[in-house]
Image (spheres, helix red, strand yellow):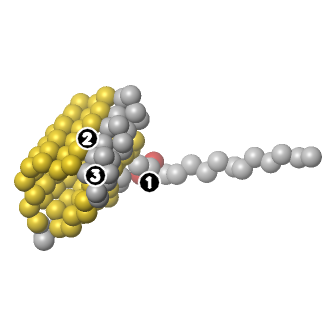
Amino acid sequence: MAFFRKKRVEQPLAEKNTFLAGGSRFEGKLSTDRTVALAGDFKGFIIAGKELSMENGSTFSGEATSGIFSLYGKAKGNFNCRLAQFFPGSHWEGKLSAKKLQVAKGAELTGEIKENLNR
């Protein structure tokens, strides 16, 4: 019996997404034209050209701008996006400017929400 290994094909660096693993902490500014996924703790400023996903167990404090904002964890701050999605068990507090808003049963939102048709 023969075993064959698939040849690993590396993505070009520009096509990779940014991920902060659970248990990690980051403070500062992060900017990318791609997707950012947070499973750890982040304090600061994020610009994500495609999507900013804050996973269950993550915490965020600061400001963020993204195409799509998906929250499963806890976030506090100012957010500007085209689509904001809040999933069951998520907790959000702050100011939100979005073109579209989706809120699942069990999500908690506190603050100011403004419709932004220009995004």
Q: What is the C-alpha distance between the residues marked 2 and 1?
A: 27 Å
Amino acid bearing label 1: Glu
Name the residue located 64 percent from the left edge and 48 percent from the top edge: 8
Which residue sits at x=38%, y=28%? 23
Crowdedness of circle 2 by 10 Å Cα count: few (<14), some, many (20+)? many
Amino acid type at mark 2 = Lys
- The residue under label 2 is 74
Residue 57 percent coordinates (x, y): 35, 37
Residue 71 in view in this figure: no
Query: Which comes before the other along the chain, label 1 or label 3?
Result: 1
| Mark closer to the chain start, 3 or 2 | 2
**Disc 3/disc 2 C-alpha distance (Å):** 13 Å
The circle on residue 15 is: 1
Q: Nearer the viewer, residue 57 or 16?
A: 57
Camera-nearest label, 1 or 3: 3
Badge 1 vs badge 3, beta-carbon distance below 8 Å: no
Mark 3: which amino acid?
Answer: Gly
Q: Position of residue 47 (x, y in %)?
A: 23, 49
Q: Secondary structure at mark 1?
A: helix
Q: Which mark is residue 106?
A: 3
83 vs 19: above or below: below
Local crowd size for mark 3, using a 10 Å CA cut-off: few (<14), some (14–19), many (≥20): few
Q: Which residue is most to the bottom?
A: 117
